[in-house]
Amino acid sequence: MLTDKVTSVKNQNVIEVNDVYKKFKNYHDKSHNLKEKVLHRERNRYDESWVLKGISFEVKQGEAVGLIGRNGCGKSTTLKLLTKIIYPDRGNIEIKGRVSSLLELGAGFHPDLSGYENIYLNAAVFGLTRKEIDKRVDEIVRFSELQDYINNPIRTYSSGMYMKLAFSVAINVNADILLIDEILGVGDVSFQKKCFEKLMEIKDSGTTIVIVSHSTDQIERICDRSIWIEDGVIRKEGTPVDIHKEYLEAMEERRLLRKQMEKEQRENAAKQEQEKADSDKRNRRRKERQEIERRREERRQRRLEGDTGEDTSKTLEELQKQTASELQKQRELEEKAALERAKQQEVANSTVPDETPIEVKRVEFFKREANRLELVVKEKNFEIERLNSVVRQKELEVNRVISEKDAEIQRLENVVEEKEDEVERLNAVILEKEEELDRVNLLMMED
């Protein structure tokens, strides 16, 4: 007797989902034809993402069940499995009766056909025969409120009119099981109320309804039970009011946690940006110090080269003075020797006897005249040498004055460089103080 009772309850289930798993492949770079697959095998690499991880639930005849959960938890995938658009990788699903799904309103509508023609086309997609459609077409047109536009091409419809016609077709299929995915916001306010009343009418007629929606109020008004799916598994199920309260609290907690994480990420990003700015500042200061040291080294090298040049110029000046003095002494000795030779020649000429012939006297006269001219030339040469010596002395004096001025200029340049060194040293001290202040500020921020 107990066995018969269990069998009777079991037979009331029109939907049975038993330990269902479903995965999808996320390709890194999917090939689109055979040639690409052969030539670029590495592009066919993919990761497996398990959307459903062993869900199980039952839906009884005439029961309305709502599926809730955040985006990506597997709600819509579950509806697609129930409509057999896709199939599970593991587990099995059993459904009894005709299924009508409101997953994508208007799927199969042709834009160039009229609204009336698209009613037949879309109803055929739901599995209705021509006779069944003929019986329901007037009710579909009346429910859609598009009597004045039903013979116009679909491409001329507004988005609201398009959705009204699609919902009217799907809702009038008279199926045993109705699957709805986020479509209760169809058309204007009055039409939405009309759709909701139609759903309540369908429920009262004994049709089984499974709804996926983020609107907990609608589910509470329509459904007898809610199933909360979280990360591919059923976290909890029960009466809508109780389940929705826990669900909303969990979503709010998740939102606050996500907000806190985003805040921490922003703070970490700001901290990293500040650290990067501090690092760039320290690098800039280090480069400035290196530049200061380089300039100091260049000035030291210039000072060393300037001192060596000054010593060399002084040594050269002394050598020039010494050489000029030696040349002067040598010229004086040569002039004295020339004068002695001239005197001796005059004495020798004065001792010539008067009895010498006239030709001899003439020869002697020309010799004396030649000697005299030679002396005159020597005197002029001596005068030239003396003047050259005076010029050289003046040049040496000028060079000495120039050297003194250069030394004074070099001294002033050294003073300027020393002042620049002092300024750069002070700049380096300022940089160090700024770095110390930055470290103190960083410690205060960390505290």
Image (tube, grey):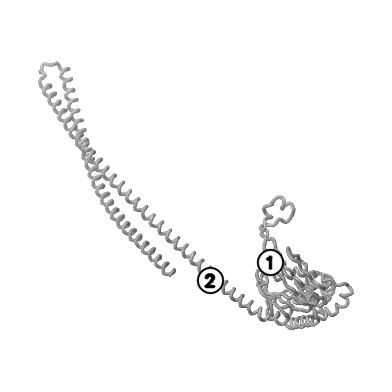
**What residue sits right under mark 1 in the picture?**
53
Q: Name the residue at 50% across, 67% down.
A: 270
Residue 25 position by quadrant: bottom right
Q: Is residue 45 left or right of residue 292?
A: right
Front residue of 69/58: it is 58
Residue 166 seen: no
Locate residue 108, reporting x and y percent.
80, 69
Label 2 residue SS: helix
Q: Residue at x 70, y 50 (%)?
A: 39
Q: How many marks?
A: 2
Q: Quadrant of the C terminus?
A: bottom left
**Who is closer to the viewer here, 244 or 30?**
244
Give 148 or 271, whichever is nearer the viewer. 271
- Whichever of callouts 1 and 2 sits on the residue coming sooner in the sequence is 1
**Labelled pair 1, 2 in contact (Cβ < 8 Å):** no
- With respect to residue 446, does 405 lie above or below? above
Q: CA distance from mark 1 to mark 2?
A: 32 Å
User: Which class describes the residues within 10 Å of circle 1: few (<14), some (14-19), or many (20+)?
Assistant: some
Select label 1 or label 2 by which is in front. 1
Q: Amino acid at mark 2?
A: Lys
In the displayed structure image, the side of residue 431 where residue 358 appears, left or right: left
Quarter of the figure that contains the N terminus = bottom right
Instruction: Answer few, some or many: residues within 10 Å of disc 2's Cα (few below 14, many 20 plus, some between 14 and 19).
Output: few
Question: Could you say whether the residue bearing mark 1 is in a helix, strand or loop?
Answer: strand
Residue identifier under label 2: 263
Residue at the image point whose x is 73% and y is 80% from the top = 224
